[in-house]
Image (cartoon, coloured by chain):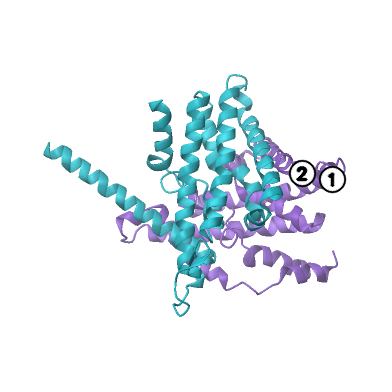
Amino acid sequence: MNYLLFILAAVFVNNYILSQFLGICPFLGVSKKVETAAGMGVAVIFVMTLASIATYFIYSFILVKLNISYLYNIAFILVIAALVQFVEMFIKKSSPALYSSLGVYLPLITTNCAVLGVAVSNMQAGYGFLLSALNGFGGAVGFAVAIILMAGIRERVEENDHPKAFEGFPFALITAGLMSIAFLGFQGLINVSTVVKAMGL
Amino acid sequence: MSKALSAIKNGIIDENPTFIQVIGTCPTLAVTTSAINGIGMGLSTMVVLICSNLFISLLRKIIPDTVRIPCFIVVIASFVTIVQLLLSAFLPELNESLGLYIPLIVVNCIILGRAEAFASKNGPITSLCDGIGNGLGFTIALCIIGLVREFLGAGTLFGATVLPEAFPKTLVMIMAPGAFFTYGALMAIFKRIINKMKEKKAANEAAA
């Protein structure tokens, strides 16, 4: 139950896009069509979960052991870049169909700040292996939910009349603001630190 | 010399990273709860941008083309680490309020973007000026957004109270939604001004 609450908190309460402002670039850039948004969402879920796990191991078994934890930033970004490259090669070999639908989005994920953000915040919160993985997964699901909702709204807004100056990004930002107000409603629903304490981890 | 100056102006106005190119949006939205935070973030990013532009430009003939992106990232990440350590030593309060977003300067698209599009093709001096221009453009934009949000949300400017106590404060402006609204509205205004300027220019040319 507590694990479920922890994931729900990562998806809704601390939504990476709408309350922590991570991963805004892809959120604005690839949210014009629902299908592409869904593709991006799936790719992010995949990479972010793996990245949380990989950076956890790198941090606690290499950086801390060697006493060079201040180099975490350089280590994490390299791990993420390598991981994205590896995932791309793996999918290309094992499932060409999945590759052709995800392909374009994978390289973009390296510069998605939500991925590095989740790695750094896991480390700062001192989460163990399981919590890191769950936080990465939950955060990525939150990203996917937000970007798909956004694409759905934008598809409809495109056809309406609106002031010329607001075309494109300004309109997307106002839409995101309204979504963010809706997500404010989840605030206080789940208290992450009490959930973590209740798990005794 | 004129090339260097035009690189600076280009970064501040014609290709303003925040309002025209719309890159580096995450810190733009996240840390602009007050003007001071915006300036702090802008200057930190600017330092990293200037140093990385200079270094990448100096190393551009040594770095092999195929592995240039990882090389750029390592250079940028090193400078970010330096800035982070300096901030936590000398400006611990600012470091605290910017928090997670300092390490995230690494993935700020402005820096990698300038490295890829400008510094890897130009000499060190022009690259340095390009870094200053883009850094200033980013800092100014963050400062404006910070000022608007701070004024409407907390009734202060640079921490000093300017609105009377009785004046209702729009708390939502310093929360997450306010960031989106302010950025969107400011971008629309910026666009409108530029469109008007273009129309005028076109009309002048037509008349002449």
Quadrant location of residue B58? Answer: top right
Task: Give the residue pinned by disc 1.
Answer: A64
How many other residues sit within 10 Å of disc 1, few (<14), some (14-19) or many (≥20)?
A: few
Q: Which element type, helix, strand or loop, lies under badge 2? A: helix
Could you tell me which residue is drawn at 42 percent across and 43 percent down? B16
> In the figure, is residue B113 to the left or right of B10?
right
Q: Is residue A83 above or below residue A114?
A: above
**What quarter of the picture does the C terminus of chain A occupy?**
bottom right
Residue B49 place in picture, x, y as percent: 56, 38
x, y percent for residue B195? 28, 48
Q: Colour of chain B?
A: cyan
Q: Amino acid at mark 2?
A: Tyr
Q: Which chain is purple?
A: A
Badge 2: few (under 14), some or many (20 or more) residues near its Cα, within 10 Å?
A: some
Which is more toward the observer, A156 or B70?
Answer: B70
| Amino acid type for the residue under numbered disc 1 | Val
Q: Chain of mark 2?
A: A
Q: Is residue A152 visible?
A: no
